[in-house]
Amino acid sequence: MSQQPRSAATNPNVILPVLYALVVIVVGTLAGGTVTAVVAVAGAVLLGLYFAFGRKGRNRG
């Protein structure tokens, strides 16, 4: 059985990187460079872990 294709609005593989970029932009606008760097690095690590491990677990049936 094949799954229905997801639109970009409901696909976490699209939503999470866009959300990450928006958070970094907002924090960069409101906070200093050190805070922005910490948020960017932490978010990048979490996003990388999602794409390395979390996404694979969802695709297995």
Image: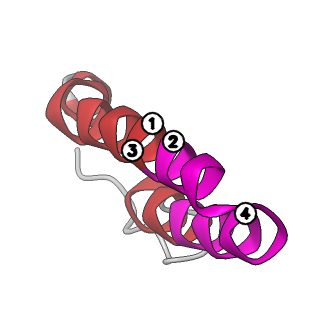
- Inspect the magenta stretch and tell me whether residue 41 lies in it: no
| The N terminus - image quarter | top left
**37 lies left or right of 10:** left
- Of residues 35 and 26, which is closer to you in this image? 35
Badge 2 crowding class, 10 Å Cα cut-off, few under 14, some 14 to 19, many 20 or more, is: few
Looking at the rendered structure, the kind of residue marked 4 is: Val
**Residue assigned mark 2:** 38
- Of residues 11 and 20, which is closer to you in this image? 20
Residue occupying the point 48% across, 52% down: 37
Residue 5 on image: x %, y %: 37, 68
- Inspect the magenta stretch and tell me whether residue 25 lies in it: yes
Residue occupying the point 70% across, 61% down: 32
Badge 3 crowding class, 10 Å Cα cut-off, few under 14, some 14 to 19, many 20 or more, is: few
**Residue assigned mark 1:** 42
User: Which numbered marker is on residue 50?
Assistant: none
Query: What is the span of residues highlighted in magenta in the rendered image?
Result: 20-40
Looking at the rendered structure, the kind of residue marked 1 is: Ala
